[in-house]
Amino acid sequence: MRLSEYFLPLLRENPSEAQIVSHRLMLRAGMIRQSSAGIYSWLPLGLRVLKRVEQIVREEQDRSGAQEILMPTIQPAELWHESGRYDDYGKEMLRIRDRHDREMLYGPTNEEQVTDIVRGAIKSYRDLPKNLYHIQWKFRDEVRPRFGVMRGREFLMKDNYSFDVDAAGAKHSYNKMFLAYLRTFARMGLKAIPMRADTGPIGGDLSHEFQILAETGESEVFCDRAWLNTDILAEEVDYDSDLEPFFRHWTSLYAATDEMHKPDTCPIPSEQLVTARGIEVGHIFYFGTKYSVPLGALVAGPDGEMVPLEMGSYGIGVSRLVGTLIEANHDDNGIIWPDSVAPFSLGLINLRVADARCRAAADALYGKLRSAGVTVLYDDRDESPGAKFAAMDLIGLPDQLILGPRGLAAGTIEWKHRRSGARQDLPIDTAVARFVA
Ligand code: 5CA
């Protein structure tokens, strides 16, 4: 993409409404614009990152055996009357009436809707287990939307729902998601600590939140100091094996959110306990028959008896992750994208567009990189070098190639690694090969 043609409305000044660094940088880097409180438009650069995050989430859901569907954003109120949650959900739910005066709502979550789909389609334990996910916009009329996409009113969530015939099967489904979540966040270079959590309006009694430790986090969390030195890698584990040992291993170190942490009964000594702030990027729940009983989602079990489905639900804040990734990866000059989610992998800067030789060499390099499949943002604008360096650092692409008349005369181009700041002159002829995966 040529920057001269790209829609990238950068802001020079820090927007006064932004209190945390990710919100500031998303606005300054032209990734989002606010539409109304807690509701945003995603501009080209921001959308590329959102799509990459979404794709990692999707790949790990698929790998776990979950199947993608797409449910609507607007739901009929009847389903929520059936489950009894229509009144419970209170002011957070955006309620709508259609032209026939039917009660509708903009979905804050989809337990009822997916249970309705499954109850009509699955009649026997032989068709279980099933795990269905979708990546869809949600609306919650939050009292205090804030911090940009971190606590929005409209936000993108990956949510999925598991259906099993009995509690043992449901726990296996829970463990699979536990594994999928550790893998998902690790692939983004994030350290998400699984913490015992409260179930709130979703219900149930087994629940974990995945928390990224960060000063700007909205949750107060408590964990064993040993977590600080524990790496969480995208482990290769067979999803069909017994996942209990894996689950036990990753829950053996103490970690709890503030609703679950009880100082009096905390199992570890106070000098071993860390109190910190966390960003909740995922939340998983096992709630058994909470929805299947009122909605009448029953299947014939192995002995022919009709039994209610055992269910769990699992959420990842896809749009929140974009802000979280910036909270975890930035410096004074701007964003530093991890390779796995970067909107482009390389920024190519032509320092002297008025110079015909520089332009020809930069154009040729741009062409070669594109043919090699490298995603490149090419700064071919007629701007000062300082403005170009600042823009490239602000948007945070992992690598930069800087071409100027002096290097060109010597047959070299400067490579700058955004994260380390390391710089090196590379021969122009072989530079492309270095960035081909
Ligand atoms: N039905 C369940 C799981 S599918 C559910 O709704 N869980 S949740 O309420 O915990 O939300 C799942 C994830 O969505 C959270 O972990 C968080 O990362 C994200 N999320 C929740 N509310 C917001 C919000 N207002 N803005 C941005 N992300 C949010």
Image: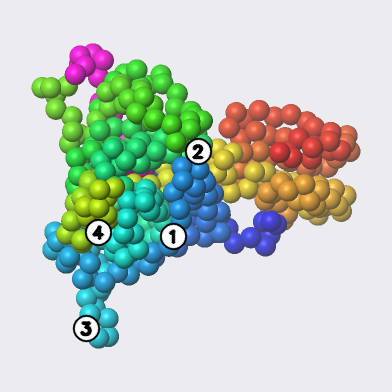
| Marks 1 and 4, the one that precedes in the sequence | 1
Q: Is residue 118 above or below residue 263?
A: below
* Residue positioned most to the left: 264
What is the distance, in whole Å, between disc 3 and disc 2 at their CAs?
A: 45 Å
Image side of residue 368 versus residue 333, left or right: right
Percent of width and height locating residue 193: 35, 31
Percent of width and height locating residue 35: 39, 65
Residue at the image position 68 percent from the left and 59 percent from the top: 4
The local secondary structure at tag 4 comes to loop
Residue at the image position 22 percent from the left and 70 percent from the top: 77
What is the distance, in whole Å, between disc 2 and disc 4 at their CAs?
A: 37 Å
- Which residue is under mark 3? 101
Q: Is residue 180 above or below residue 384?
A: above
Q: Which residues are magenta?
A: 267-284
Image side of residue 38 versus residue 27, left or right: left
The local secondary structure at tag 3 comes to loop
| Marks 3 and 2, the one that precedes in the sequence | 3
